[in-house]
Image: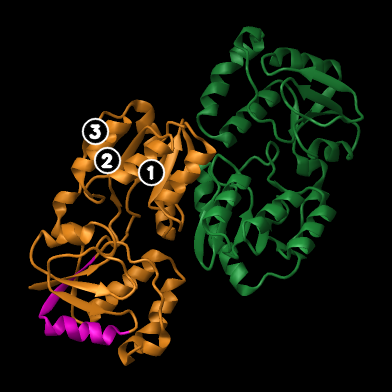
Chain colours: A green, B orange
Amino acid sequence: MARAIIAGAGALPGLLLQSGPAHVVRMQGVESDPLDAPEIVARFEQFGALFAALRDAGVQDVAFAGAIGRPAFDPSLMDPETMTLMPRVAAAMGQGDDALLRTVAAIFEEAGFRVVGALDLRPDLAMTEGAVFGTPGDAQRADAARARAVLDVLGPLDVGQAAVAAKGQVIGIETLQGTDAMLRFVGASLPASGGVLVKRPKPGQDLRMDTPAIGPATVMKAAEAGLSGVEIAAGSVLVLDQEGVIGACEASGLALWAAS
Amino acid sequence: MARAIIAGAGALPGLLLQSGPAHVVRMQGVESDPLDAPEIVARFEQFGALFAALRDAGVQDVAFAGAIGRPAFDPSLMDPETMTLMPRVAAAMGQGDDALLRTVAAIFEEAGFRVVGALDLRPDLAMTEGAVFGTPGDAQRADAARARAVLDVLGPLDVGQAAVAAKGQVIGIETLQGTDAMLRFVGASLPASGGVLVKRPKPGQDLRMDTPAIGPATVMKAAEAGLSGVEIAAGSVLVLDQEGVIGACEASGLALWAAS
């Protein structure tokens, strides 16, 4: 059951490596931290070569970890396997992040690999239901419920992993630009709202490919945006650097809790 | 059938006055343009006095026009009628703009007035289905459909009169802060998206109290945000200053169309 971690930016590849030995795949043009593991270097234009290298290494399980971005793609470098796959990938790209990731997962599975998620390897990185730091008040719970209702209806449209409500009103809904951009918008337009950030996967989202995550920076950015609390989905949002996250809650006074 | 226009900011009170003679109600703390019509001065703390003044003037139909904002409210000035109404108003305030406006409309109706909307008085201010300026391309139509799908699911939650999509991705969803704030966010985070702004009432929204509207400034702000087109709902979005709007489309190159 040899394993490979396709490494993107941030701490997640290293955290997954802690769950057991693995090859680390470095994609050209993707930033990733150095790790103490055998490496496979690959590029998006050459899926055929990547699959061959994974097979040569005896890899059966593949985990995607960390932000990949949308690196430059040079069509002149494509190998035949990639050319065959391109129409599917291109079609999926127009349908939102989730559709694209589902297609990429299907492509790896059809090539004979099992796609495993961050939570399969490190279930301890998610939180069980309940308070993580502080205790949410009734108004915070009500704001969280309002933000959750928005995410519930948007999920089937493949929109929104996060939303913010304050005093019963919705004041931020995550779009393509991501959670940080939404928090900057909220902070700039309503500086001291005291609102609650809710972060959770879209209903039906393939968690193996893209598990929502928070870290100390998320808490600090929520605090800078004038919020009073953060609710994450129990069991399906990664908390990267739990000690650092609790330290950020202490420093900023924000409450943090996990809800089902 | 004497009529009163409760005047807020902007051009709408004057446009409604053009449909026939009316008293103009000036609420203390609310900005409104001078108009050539008999005035009734009132304050939010004294609904009883306002209703009495309207009856004295023989008013049967009441139209709300223009932005009212949330002016200061001095509880010590409340008359008995307002005290009786406050619990209902306060409860509605926590449920979103639409709930609040529905409650205010109900209060006026229970006091014996008929609430009429801007489109009842000036149906010519809305557009019939079709191109207003330029012709939307297929990609623009597809982006508009994507933004519309988002507004359709959010409407029942009383969220969102506008959204922006570009290249199949949702990049802006209006929240409490309004359309202009959303356009600034889109322009700042994705400067040249070429996206489409869709503006339409929420499904089930009471158009009498708050009819979505665009004007020349809306088109210019959409252009500054890097968009390529604007779609409004046929028959239910007011176009204030149609000549100015078309001039703004000409100046900016944005397409504008109405869809059912």
Q: Is residue B60 magenta?
A: yes
Dot 1 alpha-carbon crowd within 10 angstroms: few under 14, some 14 to 19, many 20 or more = many
Outermost residue toward the bottom? B80
Image mark for residue B148: 1
Q: CA distance from mark 3 to mark 1?
A: 20 Å
Q: Which residue is identified by label 2? A: B259
Identity of the amino acid at label 2? Ala
Identity of the amino acid at label 1? Arg
Q: Nearer the viewer, residue A24 or A245?
A: A245
Identity of the amino acid at label 3? Phe
Quarter location, residue A21? top right
Give the x, y percent position of residue A20.
Answer: 90, 36
The answer to whether residue A238 is visible is no
**Do callouts 1 and 2 mark residues in contact (Cβ within 8 Å)?**
yes
Give the x, y percent position of residue A159.
Answer: 53, 43
Q: Secondary structure at mark 3?
A: strand
Outermost residue toward the front? B34
- Indicate which disc, 3 or 1, sits on the residue closer to the N terminus: 3
Quarter location, residue A127? bottom right
Image mark for residue B258: none
Q: In the picture provided, is A185 more to the left or to the right than B232?
A: right
Quarter location, residue A186? bottom right
Q: Quadrant of the N terminus of chain A?
A: top right
For the magenta stretch, what is the residue range? Answer: B46-64
Image mark for residue B133: 3
In this rendering, do the residues under marks 1 and 2 share a single chain? yes
Q: Quadrant of the C terminus of chain A?
A: bottom right
- Indicate which disc, 1 or 2, sits on the residue closer to the N terminus: 1
